[in-house]
Image (cartoon, helix red, strand yellow):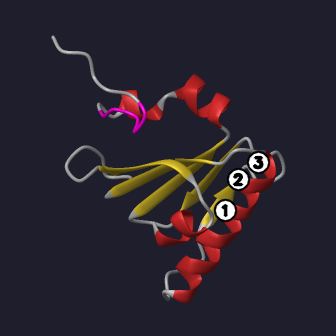
Amino acid sequence: MTALEDLKAEDISLIDLEGKTSVADWMVIASGRSTTQVGALADRVVRALKDMGARTPGVEGLPACDWVLIDAGDVIVHLFRPEVRAFYNLEKMWGVDRPTEARSPG
């Protein structure tokens, strides 16, 4: 989370997956304003994980940097350009609101 905040990631969401899936315990979703920023965010997250002593994470999506997935075992990080994030809307799939959206009453 700190690595993302340091590089000014936008709309950071932390989703607790414990008991919902065996894939991971946590999911982090964040946006970068451009493909360049998404790539820089991914690089910083991977370096931060290595600095913490975590195993080398699996990374997918770096060539295009529209959506980069970082699989760090218990934590999965999704980094998006805003338009791509809105299209896939992973928060809705997991039953949580995006940071910039408020759930309508009802």
Q: Which is nearer the N-term, disc 2 or disc 3?
A: 2
Cα separation between marks 1 and 3: 9 Å
Q: What element carries label 1?
A: helix
Q: In which quarter of the image is residue 40?
A: bottom right
Q: Are marks 2 and 1 in contact (CB under 8 Å)?
A: yes
Q: What element carries label 3?
A: loop
Under mark 2, the amino acid is Val
Q: In this view, does 64 lie to the left or right of 67?
A: right
Q: In which quarter of the image is residue 66?
A: top right
State the predominant SS element of the stretch in magenta.
Answer: loop
In the image, residue 84 above or below residue 26: above
Under mark 1, the amino acid is Ala
Cα separation between marks 2 and 3: 6 Å
Residue 36: tell me if it is visible.
Answer: yes
Q: Which is nearer the N-term, disc 1 or disc 3?
A: 1
Can you identify the residue that label 2 sits on?
38
Q: Which residue is drawn at 54% across and 78% down?
A: 49
Q: Which mark is residue 42?
A: 1
Q: Do the residues labelled 2 and 3 touch (CB within 8 Å)?
A: yes
**Does 106 lie within the magenta span?**
no
Q: Which residue is drawn at 60% across and 77% down?
A: 56
Specify start and end residues of the magenta stretch as a single range: 96-100
Residue farthest right in this picture: 63
Q: How crowded is mark 1: few (under 14 residues within 10 Å), some or many (20 or more)?
A: many
State the image coordinates of residue 55 (x, y, percent, origin top left). 53, 80
Under mark 3, the amino acid is Cys
Residue 24: tell me if it is visible.
Answer: no
State the image coordinates of residue 44 (x, y, percent, origin top left). 65, 71
Q: In this view, does 88 lie to the left or right of 24?
A: right
